[in-house]
Image: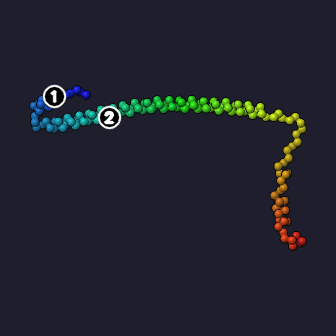
Amino acid sequence: MFDIGFSELLVIAVVALIVIGPERLPKVARTLGHLFGRMQRYVNDVKADITREMELEELKKFRSSMEDAARSMQDTVTSGVSETEGELNQLAQEARPAPDPGPESPPAPADAARPDSRQLDLALDTNRQTPAQKQV
């Protein structure tokens, strides 16, 4: 990062020993190490935030492109379905027979062919009677 070699670090340590003194040098070194660690954590947090924002921006772009693709697919399917529905309706209209111009008789009621349920119950009751009951 700063391109400092071992010989340069050795020169800095000797100068710090002479200027600061042997009694205060360990305390100053601890403080500098603590501040340097704090600075590294701060820089790493900033890098992580920037990376996260870049990934979020990429995800937003990807999401919008997927939404556009889904919308176009939906439009394509909708238009295909409506075309097919129109063709089927046209075929259904062509297949319908023309109405008969002759006289129409009203349709027979559906209940006329079936006997009434009360009549069936009476018929069943008469069949269930014993011969002695029928004679009476």
Residue 83, quarter of the rendered image = top right
Question: Residue at the location (57% across, 29% down)?
Answer: 72
> In the figure, is residue 52 to the left or right of 20?
right
Label 2 sits on what residue type?
A: Asp
Which residue occupies the foreground of this view, 6 or 18? 6
SS label for mark 2: helix
The residue located at (22%, 26%) in the rendering is: 3
Q: Which comes sooner in the sequence, label 2 or label 1?
A: 1
Look at the image and tell me whether residue 12 can be seen. Answer: no
- Check residue 45 in the rendering and tell me which mark sits there, or answer none: 2
Regarding mark 1 in the picture, which secondary structure is present there? helix
Report, in whole angstroms, how far the alpha carbon at label 2 lies from the one at label 1.
31 Å
Point out which mark residue 7 bears.
1
Of all residues shown, which one is farthest toward the bottom? 132
In the image, is 130 to the left or to the right of 85? Answer: right
Where residue 25 appears, as percent x and y from the top left, is 13, 36
Residue 28 sits in which quadrant? Answer: top left
Residue 15 found in image quarter: top left
Residue drawn where x is 20% and y is 35% of the image: 32
The residue closer to the viewer here, 126 or 33, is 126
**Residue 83 falls left or right of residue 12:** right
Q: Position of residue 61 (x, y in %)?
A: 46, 29
Neighbor class of circle 1 (other Cα within 10 Å; few <14, some 14-19, many 20+) is: few
Of the residues shown, which amino acid type is indicated by label 1?
Ser
Q: Nearer the viewer, residue 99 or 34?
A: 99
Q: Quadrant of the C terminus?
A: bottom right
Q: Are marks 2 and 1 in contact (CB under 8 Å)?
A: no
